[in-house]
Amino acid sequence: MKTKRVALTAEIEKYEPGKGLEDGFELLSEVVTKGWIVTDFLVKVKRPDGRIVCPYILNRRGRVFIGEGDYVILDSDGSRHVCGADKIWMRYEKPEDAEL
């Protein structure tokens, strides 16, 4: 069966540390040790104490780590997602006045 996805309005914002878009941070050493994902392109934030942490959001699939250039999406139904810059404008209409 084929169908179309129901249209939702979404807030899309390119991720930058300090904007509060993430739900938390995980130590890079934990991400590497647990082997969750390839870490090469993850956003890495250096804390004043020298620890390096990686931001993530929580959704129904668990922790989704944010990569360099990723966008955080907040759908009108309240769900949050991360989408890479390589796919964002194939999945969402780019606003004409966007400075994204």
Image: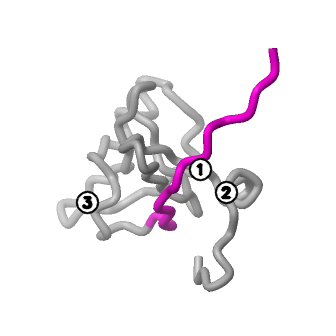
Crowding at dot 3, Cα within 10 Å, few <14 / some 14-19 / many 20+, comes out as: few
Residue corresponding to mark 3: 50
- Lateral position of residue 94 relative to residue 69, left or right: right
How many circles with numbers are drawn on the protein? 3
**Residue in the image at 68% along x and 69% along y:** 94
Q: Secondary structure at mark 1?
A: strand
Q: Secondary structure at mark 2?
A: loop
Q: Residue furthest right?
A: 2
- Per the rendered image, the range of residues in magenta is 1-15
| Quadrant in the rendering for residue 61 | top left
**Does the magenta portion include 74?**
no
What secondary structure is the magenta-colored segment mainly?
loop
Residue corresponding to mark 2: 92
**Residue in the image at 59% along x and 63% along y:** 69
Q: Are marks 2 and 1 in contact (CB under 8 Å)?
A: yes
Pointer 2 or 3: first along the chain: 3
- In whole angstroms, how far apart are the C-alphas of marks 2 and 3? 37 Å
Residue corresponding to mark 1: 83
Q: Are marks 1 and 3 in contact (CB under 8 Å)?
A: no
Q: Is residue 41 above or below residue 16?
A: above
Front residue of this view, candidates 90 and 29: 90
Quadrant of the frame with the C terminus: bottom right
Indicate which label's residue lies in the foreground, 1 or 3: 1
- Lateral position of residue 51 relative to residue 28, left or right: left
Q: Is residue 59 above or below residue 16?
A: above
Disc 2 marks a residue whose amino acid type is Tyr
